Image (tube, helix red, strand yellow):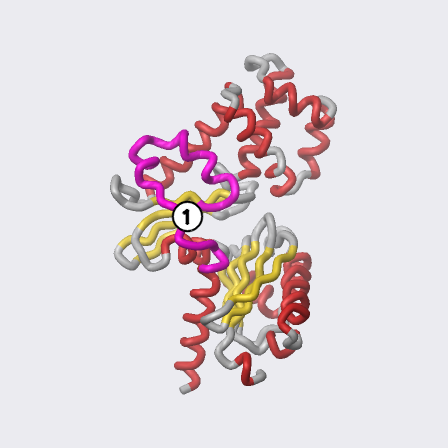
Amino acid sequence: MTDTLKTSVLALDGGGTRCRLALSDGDSVITVETGSANISTDMAGAVAQVRDGLDQLAETTGHSAAALAMCPVYIGIAGVTGAQIAERFSDALPFQLVRVTDDRPTALSGALGGSDGLIAHCGTGSFFAAQIEGQSRFAGGWGSVLGDPASAQWVGRRALACTLEEVDRLRESSELGAQLLERFGGSAEIVAFAVKARPADFGRVAPDVTAFAAKGDPLAVEILTDAAHEIATTLHKMGWKAGLPLCLTGGIAPQFLPYLPPAMQEACIAPRGTPLDGAITLAHEFAREVRDDHH
Protein backbone atom coordinates (compact mmCIF):
# COMPACT_ATOMS: atom_id res chain seq x y z
CA MET A 1 0.00 0.00 0.00
CA THR A 2 1.29 3.47 -0.78
CA ASP A 3 2.08 5.77 2.17
CA THR A 4 -0.77 8.13 1.21
CA LEU A 5 -3.25 5.27 1.72
CA LYS A 6 -1.83 4.10 5.08
CA THR A 7 -4.74 5.45 7.14
CA SER A 8 -7.39 4.99 4.46
CA VAL A 9 -10.31 2.57 4.40
CA LEU A 10 -12.85 1.55 1.78
CA ALA A 11 -16.56 1.34 2.62
CA LEU A 12 -19.38 0.00 0.50
CA ASP A 13 -23.14 0.23 0.86
CA GLY A 14 -24.94 -1.95 -1.69
CA GLY A 15 -28.61 -2.70 -2.28
CA GLY A 16 -31.44 -3.14 -4.74
CA THR A 17 -31.20 0.42 -6.04
CA ARG A 18 -27.46 1.14 -6.20
CA CYS A 19 -23.97 0.55 -4.78
CA ARG A 20 -21.92 3.38 -3.27
CA LEU A 21 -18.21 2.89 -2.65
CA ALA A 22 -16.14 5.38 -0.65
CA LEU A 23 -12.48 5.94 0.13
CA SER A 24 -12.02 7.63 3.52
CA ASP A 25 -8.86 8.66 5.36
CA GLY A 26 -10.79 9.98 8.35
CA ASP A 27 -10.77 13.57 7.09
CA SER A 28 -11.97 13.42 3.50
CA VAL A 29 -14.32 11.05 1.68
CA ILE A 30 -14.39 10.31 -2.06
CA THR A 31 -17.49 8.48 -3.30
CA VAL A 32 -18.49 6.71 -6.52
CA GLU A 33 -21.75 5.03 -7.46
CA THR A 34 -22.61 1.92 -9.51
CA GLY A 35 -25.75 -0.15 -10.15
CA SER A 36 -27.87 -2.40 -7.96
CA ALA A 37 -26.41 -5.38 -6.11
CA ASN A 38 -27.87 -8.28 -4.14
CA ILE A 39 -25.58 -11.25 -3.56
CA SER A 40 -28.45 -13.74 -3.04
CA THR A 41 -30.24 -12.97 -6.30
CA ASP A 42 -27.16 -12.25 -8.47
CA MET A 43 -23.74 -12.96 -6.94
CA ALA A 44 -21.81 -12.46 -10.20
CA GLY A 45 -23.61 -9.17 -10.87
CA ALA A 46 -22.81 -7.91 -7.36
CA VAL A 47 -19.12 -8.79 -7.78
CA ALA A 48 -19.10 -6.92 -11.11
CA GLN A 49 -20.64 -3.81 -9.49
CA VAL A 50 -17.97 -3.77 -6.74
CA ARG A 51 -15.16 -4.20 -9.25
CA ASP A 52 -16.67 -1.43 -11.38
CA GLY A 53 -16.79 0.83 -8.31
CA LEU A 54 -13.16 0.04 -7.50
CA ASP A 55 -12.12 0.94 -11.07
CA GLN A 56 -14.11 4.20 -10.88
CA LEU A 57 -12.47 5.04 -7.55
CA ALA A 58 -9.04 4.35 -9.03
CA GLU A 59 -9.80 6.68 -11.92
CA THR A 60 -11.15 9.40 -9.60
CA THR A 61 -8.34 9.26 -7.02
CA GLY A 62 -5.34 8.46 -9.20
CA HIS A 63 -4.48 5.43 -7.04
CA SER A 64 -4.30 2.05 -8.78
CA ALA A 65 -7.11 -0.43 -8.13
CA ALA A 66 -4.49 -2.83 -6.74
CA ALA A 67 -3.30 -0.21 -4.21
CA LEU A 68 -6.87 0.60 -3.17
CA ALA A 69 -7.60 -3.12 -2.73
CA MET A 70 -4.91 -3.23 0.01
CA CYS A 71 -6.98 -0.89 2.26
CA PRO A 72 -9.22 -2.45 4.95
CA VAL A 73 -12.75 -2.72 3.52
CA TYR A 74 -16.17 -2.89 5.17
CA ILE A 75 -19.02 -3.99 2.91
CA GLY A 76 -22.68 -3.85 3.90
CA ILE A 77 -24.66 -5.38 1.06
CA ALA A 78 -28.13 -6.79 0.41
CA GLY A 79 -28.57 -10.55 0.18
CA VAL A 80 -26.15 -11.70 2.90
CA THR A 81 -28.13 -14.51 4.54
CA GLY A 82 -25.26 -16.11 6.46
CA ALA A 83 -21.50 -16.54 6.87
CA GLN A 84 -21.07 -18.91 3.91
CA ILE A 85 -22.51 -16.60 1.26
CA ALA A 86 -20.55 -13.65 2.74
CA GLU A 87 -17.34 -15.70 2.46
CA ARG A 88 -18.08 -16.71 -1.14
CA PHE A 89 -18.61 -13.06 -1.99
CA SER A 90 -15.43 -11.83 -0.28
CA ASP A 91 -13.41 -14.63 -1.94
CA ALA A 92 -14.56 -13.36 -5.36
CA LEU A 93 -13.28 -9.83 -4.62
CA PRO A 94 -9.71 -8.51 -4.92
CA PHE A 95 -9.50 -7.16 -1.33
CA GLN A 96 -6.87 -8.31 1.20
CA LEU A 97 -8.70 -7.30 4.40
CA VAL A 98 -12.47 -7.33 4.08
CA ARG A 99 -15.48 -7.70 6.35
CA VAL A 100 -18.81 -8.45 4.66
CA THR A 101 -22.16 -8.14 6.45
CA ASP A 102 -25.72 -7.61 5.29
CA ASP A 103 -26.83 -4.01 4.85
CA ARG A 104 -28.54 -3.71 8.23
CA PRO A 105 -25.58 -2.78 10.52
CA THR A 106 -24.48 0.00 8.14
CA ALA A 107 -27.99 1.49 8.02
CA LEU A 108 -28.28 1.36 11.83
CA SER A 109 -24.85 2.92 12.38
CA GLY A 110 -25.50 5.61 9.78
CA ALA A 111 -28.94 6.57 11.08
CA LEU A 112 -28.37 6.54 14.85
CA GLY A 113 -24.62 6.79 15.38
CA GLY A 114 -24.11 5.39 18.88
CA SER A 115 -27.49 6.57 20.26
CA ASP A 116 -30.45 4.46 21.37
CA GLY A 117 -33.35 4.13 18.96
CA LEU A 118 -34.90 2.02 16.22
CA ILE A 119 -35.00 2.16 12.45
CA ALA A 120 -37.49 0.93 9.89
CA HIS A 121 -35.58 0.69 6.64
CA CYS A 122 -37.81 0.48 3.58
CA GLY A 123 -36.08 0.65 0.22
CA THR A 124 -36.42 -1.95 -2.53
CA GLY A 125 -36.42 -4.43 0.38
CA SER A 126 -37.04 -3.82 4.08
CA PHE A 127 -35.69 -4.61 7.54
CA PHE A 128 -35.90 -3.34 11.10
CA ALA A 129 -33.18 -2.63 13.67
CA ALA A 130 -32.98 -1.58 17.30
CA GLN A 131 -30.10 -0.15 19.32
CA ILE A 132 -31.04 -0.13 23.01
CA GLU A 133 -28.55 0.17 25.91
CA GLY A 134 -25.62 -0.82 23.72
CA GLN A 135 -27.34 -3.90 22.29
CA SER A 136 -28.16 -4.15 18.56
CA ARG A 137 -30.98 -6.30 17.26
CA PHE A 138 -32.11 -6.90 13.69
CA ALA A 139 -35.21 -8.38 12.06
CA GLY A 140 -36.33 -8.92 8.49
CA GLY A 141 -34.26 -8.50 5.38
CA TRP A 142 -35.12 -12.01 4.23
CA GLY A 143 -35.98 -10.98 0.68
CA SER A 144 -39.09 -10.45 -1.39
CA VAL A 145 -40.33 -14.06 -1.50
CA LEU A 146 -40.48 -14.62 2.26
CA GLY A 147 -40.53 -11.13 3.72
CA ASP A 148 -39.75 -7.46 3.06
CA PRO A 149 -43.08 -6.02 4.29
CA ALA A 150 -43.60 -2.31 3.59
CA SER A 151 -40.76 -2.27 1.06
CA ALA A 152 -41.08 -0.58 -2.32
CA GLN A 153 -41.39 -3.99 -4.00
CA TRP A 154 -44.11 -4.99 -1.47
CA VAL A 155 -46.04 -1.78 -2.22
CA GLY A 156 -45.69 -2.21 -6.01
CA ARG A 157 -46.62 -5.88 -5.96
CA ARG A 158 -49.61 -5.19 -3.69
CA ALA A 159 -50.85 -2.46 -6.05
CA LEU A 160 -50.73 -4.82 -9.03
CA ALA A 161 -52.44 -7.66 -7.11
CA CYS A 162 -55.24 -5.30 -5.99
CA THR A 163 -55.60 -4.01 -9.56
CA LEU A 164 -56.30 -7.59 -10.68
CA GLU A 165 -58.93 -7.84 -7.91
CA GLU A 166 -60.53 -4.73 -9.44
CA VAL A 167 -60.57 -6.48 -12.83
CA ASP A 168 -62.42 -9.37 -11.13
CA ARG A 169 -64.82 -6.83 -9.54
CA LEU A 170 -63.80 -8.03 -6.05
CA ARG A 171 -63.09 -4.45 -5.01
CA GLU A 172 -64.19 -0.96 -6.04
CA SER A 173 -62.43 0.52 -9.08
CA SER A 174 -59.76 3.10 -8.28
CA GLU A 175 -57.86 5.68 -10.28
CA LEU A 176 -54.62 3.94 -9.32
CA GLY A 177 -55.91 0.60 -10.65
CA ALA A 178 -57.09 2.22 -13.89
CA GLN A 179 -53.73 3.94 -14.33
CA LEU A 180 -51.80 0.69 -13.79
CA LEU A 181 -54.01 -1.21 -16.27
CA GLU A 182 -53.35 1.51 -18.81
CA ARG A 183 -49.62 1.62 -18.09
CA PHE A 184 -49.13 -2.14 -18.51
CA GLY A 185 -51.71 -2.62 -21.27
CA GLY A 186 -54.16 -4.87 -19.41
CA SER A 187 -54.44 -7.66 -16.86
CA ALA A 188 -52.65 -10.27 -19.00
CA GLU A 189 -49.70 -7.93 -19.39
CA ILE A 190 -49.56 -7.33 -15.62
CA VAL A 191 -49.38 -11.10 -15.04
CA ALA A 192 -46.68 -11.49 -17.72
CA PHE A 193 -44.67 -8.66 -16.12
CA ALA A 194 -44.99 -10.18 -12.62
CA VAL A 195 -43.69 -13.59 -13.76
CA LYS A 196 -40.33 -12.10 -14.75
CA ALA A 197 -40.18 -9.06 -12.45
CA ARG A 198 -37.34 -8.67 -9.97
CA PRO A 199 -37.85 -6.81 -6.67
CA ALA A 200 -36.53 -3.56 -8.18
CA ASP A 201 -39.05 -3.89 -11.07
CA PHE A 202 -41.96 -4.10 -8.61
CA GLY A 203 -40.35 -1.23 -6.69
CA ARG A 204 -40.66 1.00 -9.74
CA VAL A 205 -44.47 0.78 -9.42
CA ALA A 206 -44.35 2.21 -5.87
CA PRO A 207 -44.00 5.91 -6.88
CA ASP A 208 -47.40 5.61 -8.62
CA VAL A 209 -48.89 4.38 -5.35
CA THR A 210 -47.42 7.19 -3.23
CA ALA A 211 -48.42 9.82 -5.82
CA PHE A 212 -52.03 8.59 -5.88
CA ALA A 213 -52.13 8.33 -2.07
CA ALA A 214 -51.20 12.04 -1.90
CA LYS A 215 -54.37 12.69 -3.96
CA GLY A 216 -56.48 10.56 -1.61
CA ASP A 217 -56.96 7.55 -3.92
CA PRO A 218 -58.59 4.88 -1.70
CA LEU A 219 -56.55 1.92 -3.01
CA ALA A 220 -53.26 3.78 -2.65
CA VAL A 221 -54.17 4.98 0.86
CA GLU A 222 -55.17 1.44 1.85
CA ILE A 223 -51.82 0.03 0.70
CA LEU A 224 -49.77 2.66 2.57
CA THR A 225 -51.96 2.24 5.68
CA ASP A 226 -51.34 -1.53 5.61
CA ALA A 227 -47.60 -0.93 5.18
CA ALA A 228 -47.54 1.46 8.16
CA HIS A 229 -49.41 -1.15 10.25
CA GLU A 230 -46.71 -3.73 9.37
CA ILE A 231 -44.01 -1.25 10.43
CA ALA A 232 -45.71 -0.29 13.72
CA THR A 233 -46.42 -3.91 14.70
CA THR A 234 -42.82 -4.97 14.07
CA LEU A 235 -41.29 -1.98 15.86
CA HIS A 236 -43.37 -2.73 18.99
CA LYS A 237 -42.10 -6.34 18.90
CA MET A 238 -38.53 -4.99 18.57
CA GLY A 239 -38.89 -3.04 21.83
CA TRP A 240 -40.07 0.39 20.74
CA LYS A 241 -41.69 2.45 23.49
CA ALA A 242 -42.97 6.04 23.42
CA GLY A 243 -40.04 8.43 23.64
CA LEU A 244 -37.49 6.17 21.95
CA PRO A 245 -36.23 7.87 18.75
CA LEU A 246 -37.30 6.32 15.50
CA CYS A 247 -35.78 6.73 12.03
CA LEU A 248 -37.50 5.92 8.77
CA THR A 249 -34.69 5.18 6.31
CA GLY A 250 -34.65 4.05 2.68
CA GLY A 251 -36.31 5.57 -0.36
CA ILE A 252 -39.98 4.87 0.37
CA ALA A 253 -39.97 4.85 4.20
CA PRO A 254 -40.75 8.58 4.76
CA GLN A 255 -43.96 8.10 2.72
CA PHE A 256 -45.38 5.97 5.55
CA LEU A 257 -44.97 8.64 8.26
CA PRO A 258 -48.53 10.11 8.05
CA TYR A 259 -50.01 6.60 8.39
CA LEU A 260 -48.12 5.61 11.58
CA PRO A 261 -49.70 5.89 15.05
CA PRO A 262 -49.37 9.46 16.43
CA ALA A 263 -46.85 8.48 19.16
CA MET A 264 -44.58 6.96 16.52
CA GLN A 265 -44.92 10.02 14.30
CA GLU A 266 -43.81 12.20 17.24
CA ALA A 267 -40.81 9.92 17.90
CA CYS A 268 -39.52 10.15 14.32
CA ILE A 269 -36.20 11.95 13.88
CA ALA A 270 -34.11 12.60 10.79
CA PRO A 271 -31.31 10.06 10.31
CA ARG A 272 -27.91 11.39 11.41
CA GLY A 273 -26.33 10.02 8.26
CA THR A 274 -26.66 7.55 5.42
CA PRO A 275 -25.90 3.82 5.34
CA LEU A 276 -22.67 4.76 3.54
CA ASP A 277 -21.73 6.98 6.52
CA GLY A 278 -22.39 3.94 8.71
CA ALA A 279 -20.21 1.75 6.47
CA ILE A 280 -17.38 4.32 6.73
CA THR A 281 -17.61 4.34 10.55
CA LEU A 282 -17.60 0.52 10.65
CA ALA A 283 -14.69 0.41 8.16
CA HIS A 284 -12.55 2.59 10.46
CA GLU A 285 -13.51 0.37 13.44
CA PHE A 286 -12.52 -2.71 11.40
CA ALA A 287 -9.18 -1.06 10.48
CA ARG A 288 -8.47 -0.37 14.17
CA GLU A 289 -9.17 -4.04 14.99
CA VAL A 290 -6.80 -5.13 12.24
CA ARG A 291 -4.04 -2.79 13.48
CA ASP A 292 -4.52 -3.95 17.10
CA ASP A 293 -4.27 -7.61 16.01
CA HIS A 294 -1.01 -6.91 14.19
CA HIS A 295 0.60 -5.19 17.20
Span shown in magenta: 249-277
Task: Estimate the x, y position of residue 237 in percent, counting from the top left.
Answer: 33, 41
Q: Quadrant of residue 292?
A: bottom left
Q: Residue drawn 52% across and 43% down?
A: 251
Task: Estimate the x, y position of residue 10 in percent, counting from the top left.
Answer: 54, 69
Q: Residue drawn 41% across and 48% down?
A: 139
Say which of 24 and 35 sits in front: 24
Vertical order, 131 against 165 (above or below): below
Seen in the image, is 86 located left or right of residue 261?
right
Res 205 seen here: yes
Q: Residue furthest bottom?
A: 295
Q: Quadrant of residue 42?
A: bottom right
Q: Which residue, given by chain and number where applicable, does mark 1 sit on?
A: 139
Task: Estimate the x, y position of residue 193 in percent, counting from the top left.
Answer: 70, 33
Label 1's element?
Answer: strand
Mark 1 neighbour class, 10 Å CA radius: few under 14, some 14 to 19, many 20 or more = some
**Placement of the N terminus among the 4 image quadrants:** bottom right
